Image (cartoon, rainbow, N blue to C red):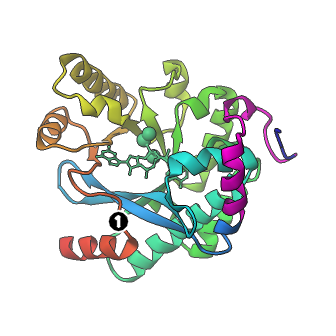
Amino acid sequence: AKRQGKNNFQIYGSYVRGMTNGNLKLETLMHKALEQQELLLLYQPQMDAKTNTIYGVEGLIRWNNDELGMVSPQEFIPVAEETGLIVPIGEWVIRTACKQNKEWQQKGLSPIVVSVNLSIRQFYQSDLIEKIDAILKETQLDPCFLELEITESMAMHADTAIVILTELKKLGVKIAIDDFGTGYSSLNYLKRFPIDHLKVDRSFVKDIQVDDDRDIITTIIALGHNLKMKVIAEGVETKEQVAFLKKAKCDILQGYYYSKPLDSKMIEEMLLHQS
Ligand code: C2E
Ligand code: CA
Ligand code: CA
Ligand code: CA
């Protein structure tokens, strides 16, 4: 069953996976996840390639349920999309990330950007801009320290996406295109989107030994720079990858080579050590 609230632009429906019986159980348990505080946000450092200091962190959600154990976001985000629960969950993610980032700043740590992933349903929710604006005011985080990640495929309805992205930019937040290279964005639109960062998908970083993939990464970095964007590589795991990406002038590096996603305390310690 497809439930589309009046609040939504009517265009995401075809993306979401069909409901299966297995998901019904997930759905029931997920309803309680928010109120019972089973959700947590981890943060993965993003390193400035030039200075080797932390540029920012990406917030990545975790769901720890008594019965199911740790459920991967790859499993529950699609279900949350389908049921609409992604809207309150997504709002929780943004609020938690902003609050945490403000807290780090209030402790005198050097300011960093916190990025959060927006799901497609959240992105096309008509009150998205008001909600983000309200959270920024409530947490008193300077908007330039919040970054929103959307995927290429989410922006496929380019005319609507451009309106939303422009409104978001007016708030002063940063925008990143996630998983870049895996969707099919029109370069023509990309040029018109107010985007700060391109995140090269992990699949291209993975086989940096393969010549063809090197060419793709080099091309994406050049494309991003030509469009006045910074380029982030994700899934960076080896020192060979780091060396190649630095040589190719990739701006920001993220991956297990530097750190797994960590809890807020551990990020705080990393920030303390670097200042
Ligand atoms: P993503 O946005 O592409 O996030 C990157 C994923 O790659 C994360 O998986 C991260 O833990 C993992 N990763 C980071 N470095 C490495 C590495 O060096 N090697 C490898 N193999 N993997 C690495 P995670 O946390 O399981 O998240 C999976 C996906 O779930 C995310 O992909 C994102 O699409 C979604 N997701 C996570 N948190 C949220 C959220 O708060 N909201 C929404 N809407 N989606 C989320
Ligand atoms: Ca992401
Ligand atoms: Ca990604
Ligand atoms: Ca991905």
Q: Tell me the kind of residue under disc 1.
A: Leu
Residue 161: x and y in percent read 65, 35
Nearer-the-camera pick, 81 or 243? 81
Q: Quadrant of the C terminus?
A: bottom left
Whether the residue carrying mark 1 lies under 8 Å from ligand 1 is answered with no
Up the image or down, 179 lies above or below 219; here it is below
Residue 92 place in picture, x, y as percent: 62, 65
The answer to whether residue 139 is visible is yes
119 above or below 215?
below
Q: Which residues are magenta?
A: 6-31
Asked if residue 59 lies left or right of residue 130, the reply is left
User: Who's the residue at 72% across and 39% down the image?
Assistant: 19
Q: Which residue is mark 1?
A: 262
Q: Residue at x 88, y 45 (%)?
A: 6
Crowd band around label 1 with a 10 angstrom C-alpha radius: few (<14), some (14–19), many (20+): some
In magenta stretch: residue 17: yes
State the image coordinates of residue 235 (x, y, percent, origin top left): 30, 42
Tell which residue pokes out farthest to the bottom in this image: 107
Q: Quadrant of the N terminus?
A: top right
Left or right: 148, with 52 as reference point: right
Residue 132 in the figure: left or right of residue 270:
right
Asked if residue 133 is among those painted magenta in the image, a careful observer would answer no
User: Residue lying furthest top in this view?
Assistant: 212
Looking at the image, which residue is at 78% across and 38% down?
Answer: 9
